[in-house]
Amino acid sequence: MPEQIDDILKDAESGMKKAISHLEVELTRIRAGKANPSMLDGITVEYYGNPTPIPQVANVSVMDARTITIQPWEKNMLAAIERAIMMANIGITPQNDGVQIRLFQPPLTEERRKELFKKALAEGETAKVSIRNIRRDGIEQIKKLQKDGLSEDVAKGGEKSVQEITDKFIVLVDKHLEAKEKEMMTV
């Protein structure tokens, strides 16, 4: 296969890997009833005028399966961290005892589990759409090369390879969703 098609395939695979990585990050943010410090990813707090992630201004740890503790290195950060968590609307009310903040994860109801799994399915569908868009772009590039003189057989082979890579990543998305469903539906 010509070098140009190899480059197209590498670009497509790289883009699809990024879509999977993004899906993994989004799925970890969907809480499944267990306390997980990654729930705080993306939440920033004002620290000397700069938006700073919570783990960079405090010690974040898991006490038990349902409790996360946040102990700031500077006591004056307690209120700012509490406010940032409230504004992030992660579905948990922080409890400030003057020394540390505790986040108690309430047990999930069956209805809430289903609702959260729908959110996970939506993230999975977004990843699939991204992967399909990358496939479309790769096939368009191959067709453009074909117009520029690439043989039809080589172009068809390249398109088939793009489709095979796409199928592999779609299956990977489904496996991630299956694992998340299993995690969320076990009580």
Image (cartoon, grey):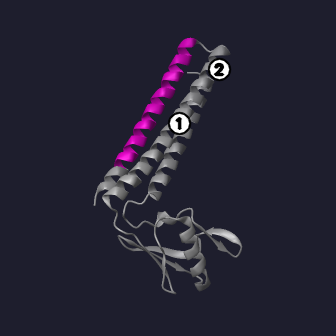
Identify residue for label 2: 144
Residue farthest toward the right in the current orientation of the protein: 49
In the depicted structure, whether residue 160 falls above or below residue 28: above
In the depicted structure, whether residue 151 falls above or below residue 115: above
Check residue 175 for magenta coloring: yes
Check residue 155 for magenta coloring: yes
**What kind of residue is marked 2?**
Lys
Q: Report if residue 6 is visible in the image.
A: no
Q: At 54% across and 38% down in the image, what residue appears? A: 130
Q: Position of residue 24 (x, y in %)?
A: 47, 51
Closest to the observer, 103 or 155: 103
Mark 2 residue crowding within 10 angstroms, few (<14) / some (14–19) / many (20+): few
Mark sitting on residue 155: none
> Quarter of the image containing the C terminus?
bottom left
**What kind of residue is marked 1?**
Glu
Name the chief secondary structure element in magenta: helix
Q: At 47% across and 32% down in the image, what residue appears? A: 165
Q: Position of residue 133 (x, y in %)?
A: 56, 33
Foreground disc of the pair 1, 2 = 2
Q: Secondary structure at mark 1?
A: helix
Q: Position of residue 36 (x, y in %)?
A: 43, 65
Mark sitting on residue 13: 1
> Quarter of the image containing the N terminus?
top right
In the depicted structure, whether residue 6 falls above or below residue 79: above
Q: At 51% across and 76% down in the image, what residue appears? A: 59
Mark 1 residue crowding within 10 angstroms, few (<14) / some (14–19) / many (20+): many
Give the magenta range: 152-179
Spatial CA distance of label 1 from label 2 is 19 Å
Residue 49: name its quadrant.
bottom right
